[in-house]
Amino acid sequence: MKAFDLTGRVALITGANTGIGQGIALALAQAGADIACAGRTAAVETVAAVEALGRRAILISADLSTIDPVQHIIDDVVQQLGGIDVLVNNAGIIRRADSLDFTEADWDAVMDTNLKVTFFLCQTAGRHMVGRGRGKIINIASMLSFQGGIRVPSYTASKSGVAGLTKLLANEWATKGINVNAIAPGYIATNNTAALQADETRNRQIVERIPAGRWGSPEDMGGAAVFLASPASDYVNGHILAVDGGWLAR
Ligand code: NDP
């Protein structure tokens, strides 16, 4: 069996200051990777925790609502850490409103950050990875890559798009030594879901509907991320791995 060891690898994670991105960054560092955190809020806690594990960590300031910083992010990581072995496209937003009232601004904001920036980060990191003949890309999808949801039209469209894009890029790059896969988290306790957790009725409904009987944590995403970042997944291409406590199985 090939190892889950990431020693000597460099992983770039977007939105690693909090939530799922932070959980994944720490799991990859525990497996041995050096970590680059790109985002608009400085991931100082994440960097300190990665360094405490004896790994290198850098911060790259970038607002990922547009593709403007994409080339700079990739260049910066390559220059400071020597290359990129793993890209985790995690940064994402959600806007809630009935489809009859949904605004163009909310449509564009979600599609730009969740889908457009994800694609161009894949493209730019992909050019670097193709040049080296190896790389792992992990996109963060959602249960709404598979289900419709309600009152989140741009989010559902963006995450369905992320799933489709993951498969397309996996097809195009499989012979170039690059694995493109996605993680589809279930209900994970983060800032993103704080309002749902605080709503007693909704919270009870959600927990009762999850076969595992609890919310997921950012740490719960770590094992899947290490697998998809490591040589253990070298023959896994275009897979959308649900990490959802069984939500989709129900
Ligand atoms: P959080 O809100 O806790 O984290 C979102 C991250 O994305 C933050 O680091 C945030 O930075 C970053 N981000 C958002 N917009 C931008 C931007 N314009 N530029 C740079 N960074 C940005 O949410 P989660 O950890 O829950 O979400 C992480 C990913 O997981 C998202 O893609 C989300 O859609 C997905 N997901 C989450 C689920 C859940 O139940 N929590 C379920 C399914 C998918 P900042 O702190 O500066 O805002």
Image (cartoon, grey):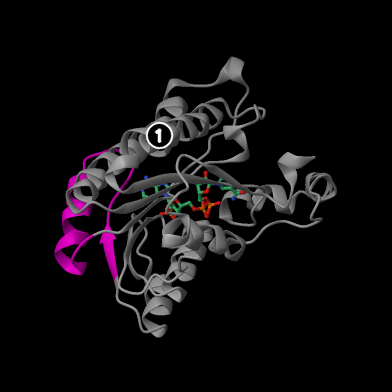
| Residue 180: % across, % down | 40, 44
User: Is residue 207 or residue 203 the one in the foreground?
Assistant: 207
| Residue 105: % across, % down | 42, 26
User: Is residue 56 or residue 85 the one in the foreground?
Assistant: 85
**Stretch of the chain drawn in magenta:** 58-83
**Snapshot quadrant of residue 7:** bottom left
Q: On the rendered image, what quadrant is the C terminus found in?
A: top right
Question: Residue furthest toward the top?
Answer: 100
User: Is residue 176 or residue 98 the one in the foreground?
Assistant: 176
Label 1 element class: helix
The relative height of residue 140 versus residue 219 in the rendered view (above or below) is above
Q: Which residue is mark 1?
A: 115
- Residue ID at (74%, 44%): 247
Residue 12 seen by the camera: yes
The relative height of residue 177 versus residue 248 in the rendered view (above or below) is below
- Residue ID at (36%, 71%): 33
In screen coordinates, is 92 left or right of 125? right
Residue 69 seen by the camera: no
The relative height of residue 172 versus residue 86 in the rendered view (above or below) is above
In screen coordinates, is 120 left or right of 47? left
Verify whether residue 119 appears in magenta: no
Q: Label 1 crowding class (10 Å Cα cut-off): few <14, some 14-19, many 20+?
A: many
- Residue ID at (40%, 76%): 50
| Residue 181: % across, % down | 46, 45
